[in-house]
């Protein structure tokens, strides 16, 4: 099973958000309009799929087709360490992140999909098969909601079986004070038995983050995700010492060395490698093992649950997957058999590889021409 071709394509999307009128451009935030889809084909006719998010999407396509393919063409798909070594040595000897990490993520996910299909096992099973289903939390607290609609949306998702919710902070014009009001409103709406996470997407400075933590410490927050600008490991460690709220980060980091910084600085309670950004399952598995050594759980941040659910199910310290409404809509459109949560859990499909069947019509309908 040797790599014969890599084909990458750009796709665009808009979604419907519960209780909001009309469609929201992109699949989460306004700038998230595009994503990269990747097909890897072997000389024996096997096909695997990979995906990454919107960052420098056109550059990722060029990297895959014009740089990664010449590097790995003809290599056996099962030689994952050798393939990664080739990409690192020839294309990224200084361990940069960004475009090359996302391209490698696409490639690696597709390779695991091929290997699973060839062996008749799911990717989760290949990773270790620690569990057959994983809990899911729904990212629902979009800034377009006012406080009353935010509460209504929270109650709606709990009624639909979710036992864990995540809301965005650090984007309201009212600053951290308004964030605190919104968090308290959600907690009042759903009660104390529902897990509640918040996500600043890197946007707070350390002082603002401390103010918010101080204000909501009695809200029983399950974790505060990526609270600080640049994911500054030193500043995260300082914040962690200053608050009782657990901290989580790592979803956009491009390789194991960057993720290791958080552990070296004792900056986090939960590590969040995301297979669509960090270098795929091969690199995420290393991050999971690193966290496991320090008795840390891994959890999914950064979305793309149909791919990250395999990591959470496969690894011993895997925990919970993010049911991000926008990225879920992408997956349910592109794939005919995308699983859905039941009573707050996602069961890993009993099908080989990713367990996903591409809808070719939807693939063509969402594709954007790249000149």
Image: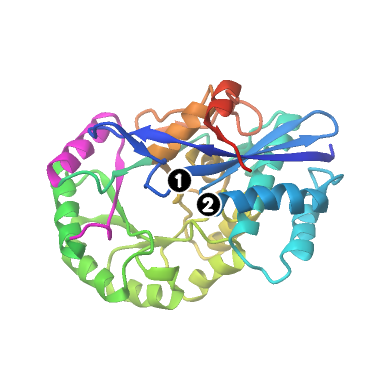
Q: Residue at x 34, y 62 (%)?
A: 246
**CB under 8 Å between discs 2 and 1:** yes
The one of 288 and 29 positioned closer to us in this rendering? 29
Based on the picture, tell me whether residue 155 belongs to the magenta stretch. Answer: yes
- Residue 216 locus on image (x, y percent): 19, 61
Q: Give the labeled residue for mark 1.
A: 303
Using the numbered discs, state the Cα–Cα distance from disc 2 to disc 1 in whole angstroms. 8 Å
Q: Say which element carries label 2.
A: loop
Name the residue at 22% across, 66% down: 212
Helix, strand or loop at label 1? It is loop
State whether residue 130 appears in this view: no
Q: Report how many numbered discs are placed on residues in the image.
A: 2
Image position, residue 18 (x, y; %): 27, 32
Residue 139 versus residue 309: which sits nearer the camera?
A: 139
In the image, the segment drawn in magenta is: 147-173
Q: Nearer the viewer, residue 338 or 178?
A: 178
């Amino acid at each position: 099973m040797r790599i014969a071709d890599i084909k990458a394509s750009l796709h665009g999307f808009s979604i419907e958000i519960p209780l909001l009128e009309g469609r929201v451009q992109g699949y989460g935030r306004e700038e998230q309009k595009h994503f990269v889809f990747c097909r890897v084909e072997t000389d024996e006719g096997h096909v695997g799929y990979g995906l990454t998010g919107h960052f420098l999407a056109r550059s990722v396509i060029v990297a895959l087709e014009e740089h990664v393919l010449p590097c790995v063409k003809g290599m056996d798909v099962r030689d994952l360490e050798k393939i990664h070594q080739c990409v690192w040595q020839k294309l990224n000897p200084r361990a940069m992140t960004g475009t090359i990490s996302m391209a490698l993520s696409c490639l690696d996910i597709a390779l695991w999909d091929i290997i699973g299909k060839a062996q008749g096992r799911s990717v989760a099973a290949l990773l270790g098969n620690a569990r057959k289903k994983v809990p899911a939390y729904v990212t629902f607290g979009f800034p377009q909601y006012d406080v009353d609609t935010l509460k209504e949306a929270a109650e709606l998702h709990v009624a639909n079986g979710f036992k864990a919710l995540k809301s965005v902070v650090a984007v309201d014009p009212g600053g951290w004070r308004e964030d605190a009001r919104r968090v308290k409103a959600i907690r009042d709406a759903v009660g104390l038995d529902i897990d509640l996470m918040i996500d600043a997407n890197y946007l707070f400075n350390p002082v603002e983050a401390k103010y918010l933590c101080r204000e909501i410490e009695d809200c029983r927050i399950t974790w505060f995700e990526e609270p600080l600008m640049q994911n500054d490991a030193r500043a995260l460690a300082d914040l962690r010492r200053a608050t009782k709220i657990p901290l989580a980060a790592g979803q956009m980091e491009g390789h194991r060395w960057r993720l290791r910084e958080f552990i070296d600085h004792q900056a986090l309670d939960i590590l969040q490698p995301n297979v669509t950004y960090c270098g795929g399952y091969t690199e995420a598995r290393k991050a999971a093992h690193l966290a496991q050594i320090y008795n840390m759980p891994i959890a999914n941040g950064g979305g793309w649950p149909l791919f990250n659910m395999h990591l959470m199910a496969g690894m011993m310290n895997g925990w919970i997957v993010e049911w991000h409404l926008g990225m879920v809509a992408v997956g349910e459109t592109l794939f005919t058999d995308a699983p859905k949560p039941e009573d707050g859990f996602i069961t890993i499909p009993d099908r080989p590889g990713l367990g996903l069947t591409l809808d070719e019509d939807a693939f063509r309908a969402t594709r954007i021409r790249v000149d």
